[in-house]
Image (cartoon, rainbow, N blue to C red):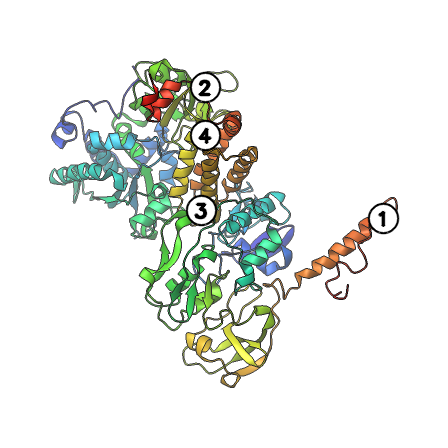
Amino acid sequence: MGKKILLANDHIEGIRFLDTYRKHGGYASLEKALKSMTPEQIVEEVKTSGLRGRGGAGFPTGMKWSFLAKPEGVPRYVVCNADESEPGTFKDRYLMERIPHLLIEGMILSSYALGAKTSYIYIRGEYFYVARILEQAIDEAYAAGLLGKNILNSGFDLDLYVQIGAGAYICGEETALLESLEGKRGNPRIKPPFPAIAGLYGCPTVVNNVETIAAVVPIVNEGGAAYAAIGVGNSKGTKLISASGHINKPGVYEIELGVPVEEFIYSDEYCGGIRNGKKLKAVVAGGSSVPILPTELILNTAAGEPRLMSYESLGDGGFATGTMLGSGGFIVMDEDTSIVKNLYTFARFYHHESCGQCSPCREGTGWMEKILHKILHGHGTLADVDLLWDIQSKIEGKTICPLGEAAAWPVAAAIRHFRKEFEDFIRNGEHVNDVKHYYRLNNLTALIN
Amino acid sequence: MAKVTIDGIEIEVPDGTTILQAARMIGGDIVPPAMCYYSKLKTSGGYCRTCLVKVSKGSEKDPRPMPKPVASCRTTVMDGMEVLNITSPEVLEARAGVVEMLLLNHPLDCPVCDQAGECHLQDLAYEHGKAETRYEFPRREFEKIDIGDKVQLHMTRCIMCFRCVKVADQITDGRVHGVINRGDAAEISTYIEKAIDNDFSGNVIDVCPVGALTDKTFRFKSRVWYTKPVDAHRDCPTCSGNVRLWYKGEDVARVTARKDTYGEAEEWICNSCRFDHKKTSDWVIEGPTKVDRHSVISANHYENLRMLKASIDRQRESLPHGDKVNLGTGALDPNNEEK
């Protein structure tokens, strides 16, 4: 059994509520921090822990915190990015609906460490009921003196608000999130300046993912060194993985970074193998925007080493043969999956979610979707595959925010690793391994005798 | 002061200058094209991505190159920065890609568009685009919308540069003009087609790089290349009164702001000057103007045909068998109307 840190208590009934949460050691970190630690010490602990941003980019959190500008007389803000919209990712939702106080405790700790007096949790519109859970928990915390003025008689004040977005993927990009939080159209800002210098309302701001902020709690409680002892290489601690797709046990798993991918897919502790005894075809390892990898490359690196669930191992080989850990949205596809159909779904999503500010993404995402739609309906030509490749190369790295890359990478990877399948699809239509399964998927049950 | 090198040309500029501004100080071919940036509008730029350049050296202190191409209009120079624009094939390739994207949903209705001849997109496509499109799907279309009684919005031609939105934000009071919808369905709109009703609303026409916002008092009156620009001024209580008149024969066909080399208005003018004073007697004439850059016609790009002929001549001379290809004299000479 791997060590669980964030989800150690998620099975306890009523852990949602303050009493139960405190009974199981909740808010001990906060008491420890406010009584015996200075803000700088907390930042140091986070640096020591080697915690990296869990939202997808994997930027070292301690370093991000130390970049925060601290001009005199200007408020600072801590914003929690709970706009979890990456297809295949649902770990933050699980964490927030199960143990909302873990996030709140993390927010208070982070705000104390960074000197923020007002903090926000920006949550996506579709998580309306989760926002209610958070608000209930915040009310409990206010009533218990854990939020508001003079928290636990330490002289530290903090107000924490939940802001519900309107359900736009782009608002998960930190500057678009800040625009939206300010009440404007959720368009990403042009960087620099980075939020650490000029973020919310032009003030220095730190934006962190839910899981990152929650991880601050055990780091403060047990010390950064204890956290850093878990994991492998520069991938420290544990990571929540949202496992979905054709596996026996989909769900949210907390893993110690460094678990072999093969073990994660096939062991009963985690995914429990491929559904219906099928063979593995491909895996999208970190949410829909990271490159898809075929079986041989996801289980082993190009050099033949077993691939591990860690930032470095999944990234091994660059995008030619590797991928990214990303947000931990682990989508498994069995041998019956059509990569062409899958890619169309992703392309449609990115087209729908493009904000429309900069031209390569606004026009290019729609173009890619239309070409894939054409291929899917049997009107594709072999030249379309090259065209798709060319379009994605014209989007990647040319846009204001990473949505351009997020839209381009899946297309690039699908063509890189499954070019033959695209060509077969164009020449012969879809290849189906298991006809009965295909009929079931497409509501053609009458055809099964 | 910061020293920056653009395509091997060094210039010293004040701190806080953007790469694009520095390039404009140098001038000439190395100036990146800009479709959305407008020096008179705060926070403009960064959207169209045509001005992408490669920073091969970040600064004297941190000489690392920047990993991705950057928008030169929104990137400030650092001391010792080295920038590649037309000397980098990668940048030219990226720019050609951006031009293709911009033209993707553009109707290319230049023959019936009032902006033709002074359209920045036309120039951009001419200079950086390809002769044919690879896009085979229907382009987006919109109904024409009247914004007040003098301005017409034809979203079909819009390339989403956001300049008019910035004008509405920054030089006119009471914003009723913005962007609705998302992605490639995004459109410029006044809130439920509410008319923009203020003294400076006409400036949205001048900032529009394409024919999306046009002057209803001039629509379909004349092709711009049949009109002659003349600088003039009048004593206007609202604005500076410094304008450019466009004559067709003896009549003032339209009034616009004076524009600089990069097609940007030098001063904003009021609606009264623009729409209501169209008689020569209203104005003190200063003299004719040369429109030097932003027009395919005025810049006489068709001279390229002459260069093409010279190049063919050169190739013909270098053929081993001598003069084998005979195009006929003057076949490519634009001044040759007889043959």
Instruction: Tell whether label 3 touches label 1 (CB within 8 Å).
Output: no
Q: Is residue A405 visible?
A: no
Q: Disc 1 designates what residue? A: B324
Residue nearest the viewer, comparing A90 with A178: A90
Tell me if A316 is positioned left or right of B23 in this view: left
Q: Find the distance from the CA under tag 1 to the CA under tag 3.
A: 50 Å
Farthest residue to the bottom: give it.
B281
**Image quadrant for the N terminus of chain B?**
bottom right
What element does badge 4 sit on? helix
- The answer to whether marks 4 and 3 sit on the same chain is yes
> Which disc number belongs to residue A187?
none
Q: Residues within 10 Å of mark 4 (few under 14, many from 20)?
A: many
Q: Residues within 10 Å of mark 2 (few under 14, many from 20)?
A: some
- Chain at numbered mark 4: A
Q: Find the distance from the CA under tag 1 to the CA under tag 4.
A: 52 Å
Is A374 placed above or below A424 here?
Answer: below
**Picture coordinates of residue A259, whole percent (x, y):** 37, 18
Q: Find the distance from the CA under tag 2 to the CA under tag 3.
A: 33 Å
Instruction: Tell whether label 2 touches label 1 (CB within 8 Å).
Output: no
State which mark lies toward you, 2 or 4. Answer: 4
Amino acid under label 2?
Thr
The disc, 2 or 4, on the residue closer to the chain's N-terminal end is 2
What element does badge 1 sit on? loop
- The answer to whether marks 1 and 4 sit on the same chain is no
State which mark lies toward you, 1 or 3. Answer: 1
> Which disc number belongs to residue A362?
3
- Chain at numbered mark 3: A
Is A350 placed above or below B285 here?
Answer: above
What element does badge 2 sit on? helix
What element does badge 3 sit on? helix
Is B111 placed above or below B134 here?
Answer: below
Q: Disc 4 designates what residue? A: A340
